[in-house]
Image (spheres, coloured by chain):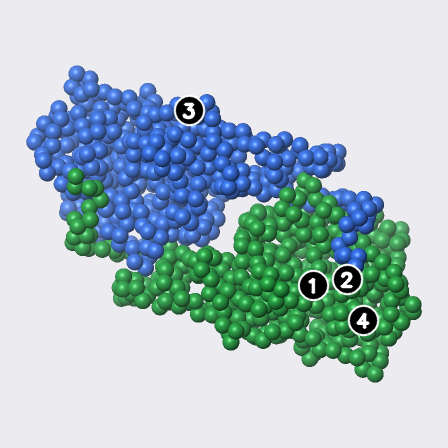
Chain colours: A green, B blue
Amino acid sequence: MAATTETYNDIPLDQLFPQDKLGWRGYVEWEDRPERKRIASEILKTKKFTPIPEFQFVPLPKTNPILVGHRWKEYHEALGLKNIVDFSWETVQKEKPGMIHLLDFPYNGETPRPELVSGKITDNKWHFVRNHGGVPDIEEDAFELEIGGLVPTPVKISMKDLKDPSKFPQEEVTVTIQCSGTRRIEQIQEYPGEGDELINAPWGEGAIGTAVYRGVPLKKVLKRACGGVLPECKHLEFVGADTYFKKGNVLNYAVSVPYRKVRANEEVLLAWEMNGKPLPKIHGFPLRAVVTGYIGARSTKWLYKINAIAEPSLAPVQAQEYLYFTQQIGKQNAKYSNGFSIQNMPVSSAIIFPTDKQVIIHDGKIALQGWSYSGGGNWVERVEVSNDGGHVWYAVDQDNMTEKHYHAWRLWKIELPVDAEGWLEFCVRSWDSSNNTEPTFVRSAWNWDLHVTSSCHRIKIYSVNKSKPATAARLAEIEAKGVSFNPLTMPLEWSLESVEDYLKYMRKHPREPLN
Amino acid sequence: MAATTETYNDIPLDQLFPQDKLGWRGYVEWEDRPERKRIASEILKTKKFTPIPEFQFVPLPKTNPILVGHRWKEYHEALGLKNIVDFSWETVQKEKPGMIHLLDFPYNGETPRPELVSGKITDNKWHFVRNHGGVPDIEEDAFELEIGGLVPTPVKISMKDLKDPSKFPQEEVTVTIQCSGTRRIEQIQEYPGEGDELINAPWGEGAIGTAVYRGVPLKKVLKRACGGVLPECKHLEFVGADTYFKKGNVLNYAVSVPYRKVRANEEVLLAWEMNGKPLPKIHGFPLRAVVTGYIGARSTKWLYKINAIAEPSLAPVQAQEYLYFTQQIGKQNAKYSNGFSIQNMPVSSAIIFPTDKQVIIHDGKIALQGWSYSGGGNWVERVEVSNDGGHVWYAVDQDNMTEKHYHAWRLWKIELPVDAEGWLEFCVRSWDSSNNTEPTFVRSAWNWDLHVTSSCHRIKIYSVNKSKPATAARLAEIEAKGVSFNPLTMPLEWSLESVEDYLKYMRKHPREPLN
């Protein structure tokens, strides 16, 4: 469908929800405007939208973008907000051209493998992106952050003031941000789960990245600008300038984090700089929250409003999504209260090289590389890999791991001894600073919303050990014939053994007993 | 490519390899004609053929026929034998129209699920077919069986004589024939293996079937017609009238079975009747071997020649295919002597209903149906199913299994108690009369040639237990809204819980501790 209703009550559609503030393009205020929300819902009710793709039952197309967000685009178009869709993709092309584009709108992009493990800091142009709406286009000079609710003094702060070190002390923190959907594809492949209006991105191992963020701790801003918070304040709600949709309603993106988390000094940052550069637009320019150790969804981008509140936000992203259900909860009985809200991320890891199903010709050792991470203020102490599906584990040497940070991953590499040939299952697990480790199988941690695939990451590789004489002989034969070992399943066109050799062996070891 | 070479040494191609005997259409004698073989090889060398499909790395197309045997058709066409290809498909259309056509040529057809478990005897039109070449079209009156080699008296026997009960005593035997590729798809999905010129059919659970065969035991024919066998005879080679290809050579289909097997009374039958009717052409009319308890490949169709031999046949189907390799053998080191030839089939089973990935709404019990079989003269004593991936097993009541036969499967059904909801793994295993049971996982028995997938058959089902109040309430809600529970991943469009209920619960059980 193409939503081209031209007017609503004689108002041209593209003027119905206008830009609210000068210099804040692509931002519509919904939360303070109940009448707008009502009209938007009414318009959405009159439309039909492209169904949500059932991609969870079929392999993903080998396209880039892999999935197209027809439905979400149509939501925007139905409200005269097509400019948001267009600007979002323009920004992708400009800021993130080389990503694996999982979903074109809202933009979800995964870091390609080589860039994922090239160093402990992910370059801004390769850091993963998981957006929930379009990309607002806000001028820094026009921007202001509003803090209200259960604070002694509600305030509005310009970027100029926020960045003034004489007003607020600045911090630089190395932070890994991870989408709770990282490695979701493993859950999807084993057992499909909930679909969503906003397609649950079929993430591989690259919905995680690490950057040095500069900003001011929210704790300090609350203290210095608002006089702290009132005793009833137990949570801080973050509202983003992006437009979000949920079951026929239109909202601004909103989540919350406990005040206790905010109080812990540098653990919640209001950040404007990423790896020494201004935040890219797609990462929240001019201001975002960076909530260390938490699910990425809390690190609100285009953060323009903070509400001090008594209870966790009732906004859908906080109360109705990113829930972790027990295995027996699903479409037949899921409620918002019978899953728990994902906040701190647990310990998890991934093998990035080699890749799943790779045929590896080696001489008894295979090099592995990957990442390991734990949230919640834990860091990774130990990484172990297995060449036999998890029976025997080899620890990675600390010299082959990047340094520890309180809030960041560690990249690692190891040469794994591999004697066996044929299909092998390699896996990795990590132990964090609180001795947490990972569930054994995807099944151990499958959940209806397909979040937090933190089970031991497993890949299958086909091992060809050329230190074995029979294999060396076959490889030489293959080389002499001028053909390639790959594709693995392509049969060799010559006889694998002479009749003489065959009979010699079989007469020594006949198939049937002699008596 | 389309092989349209018109002549070879001025002989029109379609006269180069003529019908050898009147009334034997689609049969070419290769084994007694080395010069023919040489010419055929020479012609094949001059051609390019469609590559073997790499279907093992991708899902199968949802077509019927699922795979097209381009390469094998081209082999025939290159030798002026297109009539064999055409007659084969005509026969499929006539005798097997309703099958799951896995491969159109050589014809490989699987029994659809309902027909697979409709009764202990598989109707002729539903019995699986695994052919290695085209279907010869031989007139019964023109047919004769030749027995030679290490026998006191080589003979040729007409069908009329063979069917004369005063000459040879007849037997009726209930026999399950199984392709060693049954359930190969499970191996393919986990780990791809060897490709072959003759595509390794991606069989599901339906490459097995049971029929009552009438014929004469080969033992009796040897004794009465040939005066037994010479002392050096340890094997009987069976040659079929179909044309076979292997690495540039052309042959008649041939395999062998030990004389010890033949001696065991009714265990090797020369059969002309299947379930009280003449053998269908596609099943070997006018005469086939039926080798009880063995891999189907030994039950040679269109059997026109039997050679008494001292050692197992060196024909490729016997010596180079249907080999069972150890897990570390593959393209890098496979030889013909380092796999063992599959003869007797081990105990195995399959769940036919429900089907993999089915969403099942039930009230605490789910009905299962399937088959269990053991070869080698064993029969199935016990069938067990599990609702939890193989931790707890429930035995099938003997009253819910079809009767025992020495050489046939047992069909079974059970009502399995199922309390849990969500994705569950059901599995089945059987115990045979020698106390053999099945390997636990596909991985336990994976092999390069992807034969004998006898590991516990596992399916995933999504359990919705409507005896649970929360589930009953949700189902009622779904019904009231007039929508369907399926597709499972399609989200429900309404709120799953009122804000009041949510807050009531969350205030009683808050996400964060109070202190």
State the residue in front, A490 or A382.
Answer: A382
Neighbour class for label 2 at 10 Å: few (<14), some, many (≥20)?
many
Residue B402's disc is 3
Instruction: Determine contact: label 1, label 2, CB under 8 Å.
Output: yes
Q: Which residue has dot 4 on it? A: A219
CA gap between label 2 and label 3 equals 62 Å
Q: Is residue A177 above or below residue B57?
A: below
State the residue in front, B92 or B268.
Answer: B268
Chain containing mark 1: A
The number of numbered badges drawn on the structure is: 4
At mark 4, the secondary structure is helix
Q: Is residue A263 left or right of residue A398?
A: right
Q: Is residue A37 above or below residue A20?
A: above
Q: Which residue has dot 1 on it? A: A294
Q: Amino acid at mark 3?
A: Thr
Q: Amino acid at mark 4?
A: Lys
> Which of the two labelled residues, at mark 1 and mark 2, occupies the earlier sequence position?
2
Chain containing mark 4: A
At mark 1, the secondary structure is loop
Instruction: Determine contact: label 4, label 2, CB under 8 Å.
Output: no
Instruction: Determine contact: label 1, label 4, CB under 8 Å.
Output: no
State the image quarter where residue A462 is shown: bottom left
CA gap between label 4 and label 2 equals 12 Å
Q: Which residue has dot 2 on it? A: A257
Task: State the image coordinates of residue B414 (x, y, percent, origin top left).
Answer: 51, 29
Q: Amino acid at mark 2?
A: Val
Which residue is at 22% across, 55% downward? A497
CA gap between label 1 and label 3 equals 58 Å
Task: State the image coordinates of residue B244 (x, y, percent, origin top left).
Answer: 26, 43
